[in-house]
Amino acid sequence: MSDVYYLLTDKPNLHHIFPVNFIKQTGIASQIECDSLMNIAYLSQITNLKISDKNPLDYLKEYDEPGLEAVLRSHLIPTIILEWSRGDALPENALTIFIEERVNLLLEALRVKLDGIEFNVFDMGDRPDNI
């Protein structure tokens, strides 16, 4: 029985960095941003239980130890969220900023991995609504 529980808590699962209920309660983002894959990271199940629906600034304070920035970078999570946590201030458009920075980190990682291969990025975010 203990082996089963170990496997269940040891396996990573998806977690919203900005928890869904936190977003709904504060109204800081649209449903599209809330459900964006850029708002998701792999964390162990036991960590998810500790995070719950907290403000991300609050739960990050609990994990803010030397080495956390390296962990965030290795998961392509913008360290600006850690800066917000340390400053105890979440900008009104925090999730939008976070997603844009995370997309930039992903693109940079692709550029490094695809060294020598040209690729183009099409940003549909600036297009007029009538297209």
Image (tube, grey):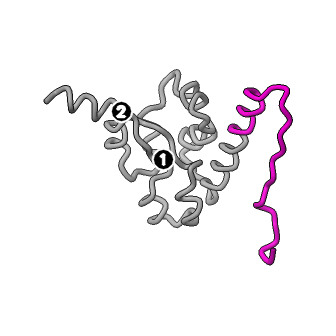
Write the residue at 81% across / 74% down.
131
Dot 2: element: loop
> In the rendering, which numbered label is found on residue 11?
2
Q: Which residues are magenta?
A: 105-131
> In the rendering, which numbered label is found on residue 56?
1
Q: Is residue 70 magenta?
A: no
Is 51 located above or below residue 109 in the figure?
below
Residue 123 vs residue 87: left or right? right
Check if mark 1's residue and mark 2's residue have beta carbons within 8 Å: no
Write the residue at 40% across / 40% down.
13
Residue 3 versus residue 95: which sits nearer the camera? 3
Residue 83 vs residue 43: left or right? right
Write the residue at 40% across / 51% down.
54
Residue 66 location (% of width, % of height): 51, 21
Residue 50 vs residue 58: left or right? left
Is 80 located above or below residue 123 in the figure?
above
Dot 1: element: helix
Q: Amino acid at mark 1?
A: Pro
Is 45 located above or below residue 16 in the figure?
above
Q: Quadrant of the image for the N terminus?
A: top left
Residue 105 location (% of width, % of height): 69, 37
